[in-house]
Image: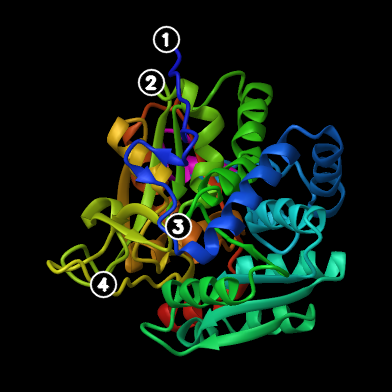
C-alpha cells in the first residue's frame, strides 16, 4: 500500500478551503509576528533542544503505551492499548503545547500571557508554565465551566494565575475564547495568547498541531517496539481537536492501512443538544478560521452541549475538517451516557479513571473491539485523567 502524501497547511494557513486568517486589522501584525517567530523557532536547534528537555524532565515524556489486558480479555476480539497522556504533568496532553508556546512567548520578550479554557486542563497547563517562567497569567473561563470544573479553577489560582469569569453567551469555551481574543486585541504589544487547541487564526492550528504531534511520534515508535507493528485502529476524542491531531498527524502517511477515528460529543443525541460539528455542522467562520460549525439557517452559532466541558465547543479545528473531506480520518460520535458507561467500565476493569473527554474515545474502542479478530490492535489516546470530572461522575453514577 502506497504512503499518503500530505502537506498542509499552505503558506497562507489554509487546509484546503478551511483555516486562514479571518481577523480584524488590529491583530494582523500579532498573527504575522507570531508566525515568523514560530517558523524560525521550528528550525532552531537550541529551541528544539530546550523544548525536548522540558518535555522529558518536566512533563514526563515519553508517556507509556499500555496494554489493557483485562479490558481486552473481557471484551474479546481486538487488543486495546492506551496512550497514557493522562500521566503527563498536570494530568493531560495540554502541557505539550503550553510549554512550546511559553518558550515562544519568552523568545518574543512577552511578559503577559493569556489563555482560554473549557475543562480547565489548558488553563492549568498555561498557569503551570507561566509559574515556571515567572510570567503574568490570565485565564478566561466561562461561568458554567467554572461551576463544573472547580478543582481546576483552584489549581490555576494556586499556581498564581488570575481566572476571569466570562458571563456572556453560553458561558462556556466559545465565549471564553472570544473574551481572550478581545483582550489580545486591546493589549497587542505586551501580550502573548496561548491558544489551547487547533482552532483559531493561522498559525495556531499548525503550531498547536506541531507541538502535540509528539503523541503520534511516540505512538508509532512504541507500537513497533512493543507490538512489532503499527495498530489497526487509532482512536481519539475530538472537541477543538488538539489531542486527536497530535495522535493522528505522524500516522497520516499510513492512513490507507490504519483506521484513524475521531469521536465527537453527541451529547444528549444528534437530534438533540450535542457538540458534533463534523457530524452535523456546516461551514462557517469562528474565532478567525473557516471550519465546520453548529449554526442555524441564518448562520448564527448555536449552543454546543456535552457532559465534558473540554468537548463543549460549537466548532472544530480546520485541519480535522480537511482530513474528513480527504477521507483520511473517519469521524463519529458518542453520547453523554455512552461516555459515562465507558469511563465506568475502564475504571472497574483497569483501575484507570480517565477524563470525560477521553471516555468518548473509549466508548468507540469498547464497541469496536468485540467485532474485530483477536490479532487486531486498537490504540486509544487517553488524553487526560478524570480527577477534574469527579463531581459530574459522582452525580451521573450516583456514587
The residue nearer to you, when weighing 152 against 84, is 152
Residue 45 lies in quadrant: top right
Q: Are marks 4 and 2 in contact (CB under 8 Å)?
A: no
Label 2: how many residues lie within 10 Å, few (<14), some (14-19) or many (20+)? some
Residue 256 — which label? 2
Residue 278 in the image: state x and y as whole percent. Answer: 29, 51
The residue nearer to you, when weighing 255 against 336, is 255
In the picture, the quarter occupied by the N terminus is: top left
Label 3: how many residues lie within 10 Å, few (<14), some (14-19) or many (20+)? many
Which comes before the other along the chain, label 2 or label 1?
Answer: 1
Residue holding disc 3:
240
Residue 28 in the image: state x and y as whole percent. Answer: 53, 57
Residue holding disc 4:
302
Camera-side mark, 1 or 4? 4
Asked if 251 appears above or below 56 in the picture, the reply is above
Residue 192 in the image: state x and y as whole percent. Answer: 68, 64
Q: CA distance from mark 4 to mark 3?
A: 16 Å
Label 4 sits on a secondary structure element that is: loop
Q: Which residues are magenta?
A: 72-82
Label 3 sits on a secondary structure element that is: loop
Camera-side mark, 4 or 2? 4
Which comes before the other along the chain, label 3 or label 2?
Answer: 3
Tell me: 394 left or right of 284. right
Residue 8 in the image: state x and y as whole percent. Answer: 47, 32
Q: CA distance from mark 4 to mark 2?
A: 35 Å
The residue nearer to you, when weighing 286 against 243, is 286
Amino acid at each position: 500500500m502506497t504512503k499518503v502524501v500530505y502537506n498542509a497547511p499552505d503558506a497562507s494557513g489554509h487546509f484546503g478551503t478551511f483555516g486562514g486568517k479571518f481577523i480584524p486589522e488590529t491583530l494582523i501584525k500579532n498573527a504575522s509576528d507570531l508566525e515568523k517567530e514560530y517558523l524560525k523557532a521550528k528550525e532552531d536547534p537550541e529551541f528544539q533542544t530546550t523544548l525536548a528537555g522540558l518535555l522529558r524532565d518536566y512533563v514526563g515524556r515519553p508517556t507509556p503505551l499500555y496494554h489493557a489486558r483485562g479490558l481486552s480479555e473481557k471484551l474479546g476480539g481486538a487488543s486495546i492499548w492506551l496512550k497514557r497522556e493522562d500521566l503527563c504533568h498536570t494530568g493531560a496532553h495540554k502541557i505539550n503545547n503550553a510549554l512550546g508556546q511559553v518558550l515562544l512567548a519568552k523568545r518574543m520578550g512577552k511578559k503577559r500571557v493569556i489563555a482560554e479554557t473549557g475543562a480547565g486542563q489548558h488553563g492549568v497547563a498555561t498557569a503551570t508554565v507561566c509559574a515556571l517562567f515567572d510570567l503574568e497569567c490570565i485565564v478566561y473561563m466561562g461561568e458554567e465551566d467554572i461551576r463544573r470544573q472547580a478543582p481546576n479553577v483552584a489549581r490555576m489560582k494556586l499556581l498564581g494565575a488570575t481566572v476571569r469569569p466570562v458571563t456572556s453567551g453560553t458561558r462556556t469555551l466559545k465565549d471564553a475564547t472570544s473574551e481572550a481574543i478581545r483582550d489580545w486585541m486591546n493589549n497587542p504589544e505586551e501580550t502573548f495568547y496561548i491558544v489551547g487547541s487547533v482552532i483559531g487564526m493561522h498559525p495556531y492550528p499548525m503550531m498547536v498541531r506541531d507541538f502535540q504531534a509528539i503523541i503520534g511520534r511516540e505512538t508509532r515508535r512504541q507500537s513497533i517496539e512493543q507490538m512489532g507493528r503499527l495498530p489497526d485502529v487509532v482512536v481519539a476524542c475530538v472537541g477543538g481537536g488538539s489531542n486527536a491531531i497530535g495522535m493522528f498527524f505522524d500516522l497520516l502517511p499510513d492512513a490507507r492501512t490504519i483506521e484513524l477515528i475521531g469521536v465527537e460529543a453527541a451529547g444528549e443525541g444528534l437530534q438533540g443538544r450535542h457538540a458534533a460539528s463534523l457530524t452535523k455542522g456546516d461551514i462557517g467562520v469562528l474565532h478567525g478560521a473557516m471550519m465546520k460549525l453548529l449554526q442555524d439557517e441564518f448562520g448564527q452559532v448555536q449552543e454546543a452541549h456535552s457532559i465534558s466541558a473540554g468537548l463543549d465547543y460549537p466548532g472544530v479545528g480546520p485541519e480535522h475538517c480537511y482530513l474528513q473531506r480527504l477521507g483520511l480520518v473517519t469521524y463519529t460520535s458518542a453520547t453523554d451516557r455512552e461516555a459515562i458507561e465507558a469511563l465506568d467500565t475502564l475504571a472497574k476493569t483497569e483501575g484507570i479513571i480517565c477524563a470525560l473527554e477521553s471516555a468518548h474515545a473509549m466508548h468507540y474502542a469498547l464497541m469496536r473491539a468485540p467485532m474485530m479478530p483477536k490479532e487486531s490492535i486498537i490504540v486509544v489516546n487517553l488524553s487526560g485523567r478524570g480527577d477534574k470530572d469527579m463531581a459530574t461522575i459522582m452525580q451521573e453514577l450516583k456514587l
